[in-house]
Image (cartoon, coloured by chain):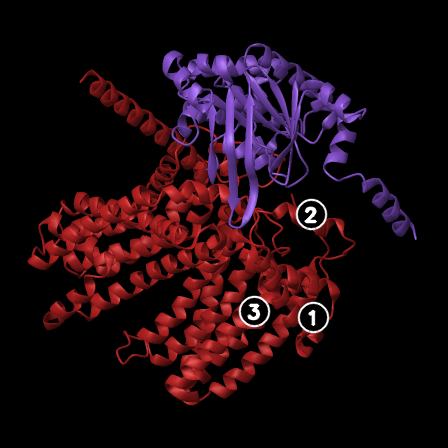
Chain colours: A red, B purple
Amino acid sequence: MRRVNRHGGGEVAASKRALSVVWVLAGLFLRLFLRGRPRSMAGATVSGLTLRVVGVLLLYLLMGVMALSTWKLGIFERSTTLHAFTLMMVGMMMAGSSGTLLFNAEEADILLHRPVTPRALLAAKVCVMVAAGVGLALALNVVGLVVGVWGPHGSWLFVPAHVCAMVLEVVFAASLVTLAYGWCLRCFGRERLDNFMTVAQVVVAVGAMAGGQLVPRLLLRMDGADVGEAMRWMVILPPAWFGALTAVLTGGSVSGLTIGLAVWGVVATGLVAWLAVGRLSAAYGDALTALNEAGPAAVGARHGRLAERVLDWPLVGRWLADPVERAAFKLTVAGLLRARDVKLRIYPQLAQLCAYPVIFLVVLPGGNPGPGETSGFGIAFAGAMASTMVFNTLEMLRFSDHWRGGEIFRAAPLSSPAPLFHGARKAVLLLLCGPVALLLTGVLLLWKGWSGGALLLLPGFCAMPFFSLLPGLWHTVVPFAEAPEQARNMSAGFLRMVVVLGAALVIAAATSWADEQGWLGLLLIVEMGLVFVASGALRLGIDGRPWPRDDG
Amino acid sequence: MMAVMRVAKWLWGGRLCALMVGMIAVRELTKCFGSQVAVQALTLDIAAGQIVGLLGPNGAGKSTTLKMLTGMLEPTSGTAVIAGCDLRSDALGVKRLVGFVPESGALYESLTGMEFLEMVAALYGIPAAAARERIQEFLAFFDLGMSTLTDKLLAACSKGTRRKVAIIAALLHNPQVIFFDEPLDGLDASASAGFKALIQSLARSGRTVVYSSHLLDVVERVCDRVIVIDRGRLILDGVPGELLAAHGEATLERLFTRLTGGTEMAEKAASFARTFAS
């Protein structure tokens, strides 16, 4: 009996110790998450954090203005729309940043020889993801909460109910991301970890985005008699679960179905969290240690051959005649295929960009376009979005965990970084954007034929050379030569992406209008002329620019 | 031996048992990565208060051995008992008793040195006030100003300072066994001398030190015993002076080169230099 008590006491003490370790680690990871790693040795001090956090929260608050569009909706529809938007934004944030948070290659050397279990490590990281997610979700939902209180069917109860459901939704998102990684680790092992980590992140990012886009559209189509049918679909869409939870807690739209959805939301969140942190954490420690071990050599060799093979194509060989451009091309291909951090940063975001055209293709031309939208606009926007991929990819390609390796370019006898930029640009055009453009064209050709569909993609694709040169207008683009934390610090980068998105919208609107007027051919000729002149001017500026004096 | 240790632990507790029987007892420790055997059936005993040099060419399995003994990697087979704690059944217990300075010297660079050390202290359950006091003592020993640790992020510190912080983080909880993997990397001459004196003092106070390095002259001067691993297997184990006498070599470097098949390197270098010149 005495022994039992002693054991019981020991277990309590061990649990307390484990909780205190989780607490310490959560504090650490939150600090690291907010602070990021400093870029250079010089001038690294503790400052600017508050400003950055406030800036991000303000940005999310502004994006939350979309909640005004839910003014006329009922409680369930409104909260589901808000949850869909929240899940999309928070899910994309988590998909984008969880890779570096969960799989820091140096972490094993820092922490795993200390009294820390993989489960504590994982739990602390999930806590940080939840904390960051809740912060962003709150900022995103401020306007939604105002609408929920003062809008039609408004109630003060909406605030606590929606916040509760939102916290649960963030826990669900964080657990789902972690579960995706844990499942990949368990099923595929460390040898194929890199590839599957990227796949898992892509799936989560696309899922979050598709859910965020599709649920509000389902709700807009749901009127009267269609409710039952639409509800059946909503059983598999998480925003509907949390929307139902808000509705039930508020006391509005209470029905058997909403109660069922709400209960399922709570159960599913608990289940996913338990699976992610409880069941699959064992493989996490091994994976963390394995990150520093050498990967299978055969993979590198295969990817190496791919770059060589592409360069052997006669036209490509002539296009990449400059040896420095060829070297940058090979480096970019290697980074895109092999570098874990680069893949985790680029592919989830690219997947979201790819998902936009698909959603526009699937939803807009499908016989029920929204007010002011035509099927032509959807297709043209898909083409323009696909062509902006080159801009976004090149912006992201500047960053790498191994950015110090970029110092070799400064040491090499190169008068300008331009050939490095062009090599990277051509790799992205040839291996990422080209195939995506071909795929979209193929889908449209099969689906709608030339005149009804594929032709409308061309104005977007025509702008691709211009978009590919655009990053060089703003800064020196050398592949993998800047610390990834720089990307997180740049609000200017976000503004640039907004400008490019605006350009894509303009192209799509012009294409749609020209198509309706029967002037598509003329538009193409004018656009090609403009792109030729603008690209030439950009190229002249980029090629003549020397290395900046101080790159940090 | 393992049974004796378990009985001793049951009778007298971990620390006393380790003092009587041996601080580290490794039996048939093996680690495989897929089909590749990194460490093969390693068996050795290390007594309390010993400084043991762990040597081997690149890829010999030194770091894997250290990672297994510090609980970072789970062995494929075999056992190890450290200060009375079984690595397989009580890895967390082992981790509380050991300190480790990894070769990478990795730290969270966006923390200040003080933030990092306080975080480490909290992981071992050291109260904040006691941790600060202990950190002050280490700072005085390493001639580091407090402002270096509080005003700058670790990214902004010199390599030597970061290495010192990694060493302090390994010793902060007063471990019984300390594993060093290339600890002198980045330290200047004076700090290196201080560090060597420190590990000798630690050993005199009963701590066991396992020191992995490629600096063979340092190992020869500092260590009581040398273990050489090659291709995952233990190929040499003994007191440096005795080993040199037994193999008829003047220095540990020459003996190591001979044992690990590196004798032809001088010839290779000469041949390569000729090619380079032409």
Drawn side of residue A22 relative to residue A287, left or right: left
A97 sits to left or right of A240: right
Identify the amino acid type marked 2: Glu
Above or below, B181 relative to A256: above
Labels 3 and 2 within one chain: yes
Q: Quick one: label 1 or label 3, which is nearer the N terminus?
A: 1
At 49% across and 16% down in the image, what residue appears? B21
Assign the N terminus of chain A to one quadrant of the image: top left
Disc 1 and disc 2 in contact, CB within 8 angstroms: no
The residue labelled by disc 1 is: A320
Structural crowding at the residue carrying mark 3, measured as other residues with C-alpha within 10 Å and reported as few (<14), some (14–19) or many (≥20) = some
Cα–Cα span, label 3 and label 2: 26 Å
Q: Residue at x 59, y 14 (%)?
A: B203
The answer to whether the residue labelled 1 contacts the one labelled 3, judged by CB atoms less than 8 Å apart, is: no
Q: What's the CA distance linking mark 1 and mark 2?
A: 23 Å
Q: Secondary structure at mark 1?
A: loop
Mark found first going from the N terminus, 1 or 2: 1
Q: Nearer the viewer, residue B190 or A525?
A: B190
On residue A240, which mark appears? none
Q: What is the CA distance from the residue labelled 1 to the residue labelled 3? A: 14 Å
CB within 8 Å, label 3 to label 2: no
Instruction: Indicate the quadrant where residue B151 lies.
Output: top right
Instruction: Give x and y (percent) for residue B229.
Output: 64, 34
Look at label 1 and name its amino acid.
Leu
How far from the left and from the top, in percent, is residue A314?
Answer: 69, 78
Question: Which of the numbered marks, if any, corresponds to residue A407?
Answer: 2
Local SS, label 3: helix
Name which residue type carries label 3: Leu
Q: Do marks 1 and 3 share a chain? A: yes
Residue denoted by label 3:
A431
Q: What is the x, y in percent for residue B48?
A: 54, 15
Q: Nearer the viewer, residue A162 or A408?
A: A408
